[in-house]
Image: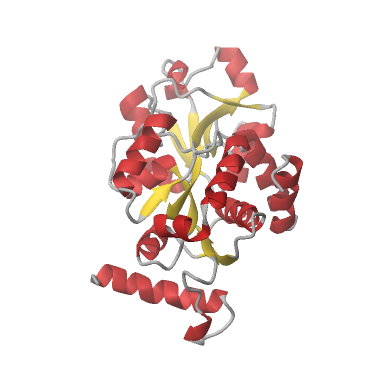
Amino acid sequence: MTRRFGVCFAVVAALLMGACGGGDTQDEPTASSGLRIASFDFAESMLLAEMYAQMAESVGVPVVRLGALGPREIIGPAMELDLIDLVPEYLGAALQFAGVSQPNPDPESSRVQLDIVLGGSVLTTLASSPAQDRNAIVVTRELAEQEGLENISDLLGIASDLGFGGPAECRDRPLCLVGLQELYGLRFAEFVPQPSLIFTAEALRRGEIDVGLLFTTAPELDDPALVELLDDRGLQPAENLLPVVRSDALQRWGPDVSRELNAMSQQLTTADLRVLNRRVGDGEVMEDVARDWLTKHGLL
């Protein structure tokens, strides 16, 4: 075992002991305990993991909810070490973590790429969803109508007079300001760091910034006063949601799991996730939000 995997095993084992309610190693979930589902450490991933869990349980498969265990640097090796069976993933982010540096905006070829990278021996993917959570370049509807803005490239003639807002790390990220400069030739008058998506949306409404970075599943994008510009030169990779799962777990728990999760993925849209994220953000119980959506779509 490499040092990286050894450290990962120790970290995740400690997290699992906490998640399962005790320090006794006999309590740690094994492959036979149930389908072990984990998430990354943010609310949308936790919600998706709960939706997957309820779908598996609907066909009689026992589920071990491991909770939010951390970033890919923890989750990825832990799946290879047979500590986790399934995690909600995003196509572009998963490819980048696997070492594919060139963004691919096409969902179908991205899925093929990811399957090739994973190899299928230990980890594989199920069907991807129409829902995508990727960077969105946003302006106010007022500015869009005033300047005839539909595409990101439409900003080229006016960017030097506009302020751009987004997370502090946006300044140095290839999918944010760096990419906007290199691929689109956009150089804004100033960059204004924002502490959160909510602040970015509010800064746009107040005119404190002219262009902002949000995410496509952010509830703030449902505001009719805001407009997402089309990424007409393909800066952003496809970020369709899909389950990444251990191949042996699919064999162990049978074909019904794949069928049900694929059925869920077929119906989940970006607009759905905005609504679900808003409900969770407003304080509704995550398990109830997940069950409500699955029931309304005839999946439970």
Closest to the observer, 240 or 263: 263
Q: Tell me which corner region of the image, top left, top right, bottom left or bottom right, holds residue 50.
A: bottom right
Q: Foreground residue, 249 or 51?
A: 249
Reply above or below: 152 against 278: above
**Which quadrant of the rendered structure holds the N terminus?**
bottom left
Residue at the location (35% across, 70% down)?
Answer: 8
The x, y position of residue 105, in whole percent, is 40, 29
The residue that appears at 43% across and 31% down in the rendered structure is 107
Q: Residue at x 37, y 31 (%)?
A: 109
Q: Position of residue 172 (x, y in %)?
A: 35, 43
Q: Is residue 296 left or right of residue 69?
A: right
Give the tally of numbered discs. Answer: 0
Residue 55 position within the rendered picture, expressed as x and y whole percent measured from the top left? 63, 52
Viewer-side residue, 30 vs 44: 30
Does residue 225 show up?
yes
Q: Image check: 40 left or right of 206?
A: left
- Residue 10 at x, y = what percent? 38, 76
Q: Which residue shows up at 55% across the image and 12% down it? A: 148
* 189 in relation to 26, above or below: above
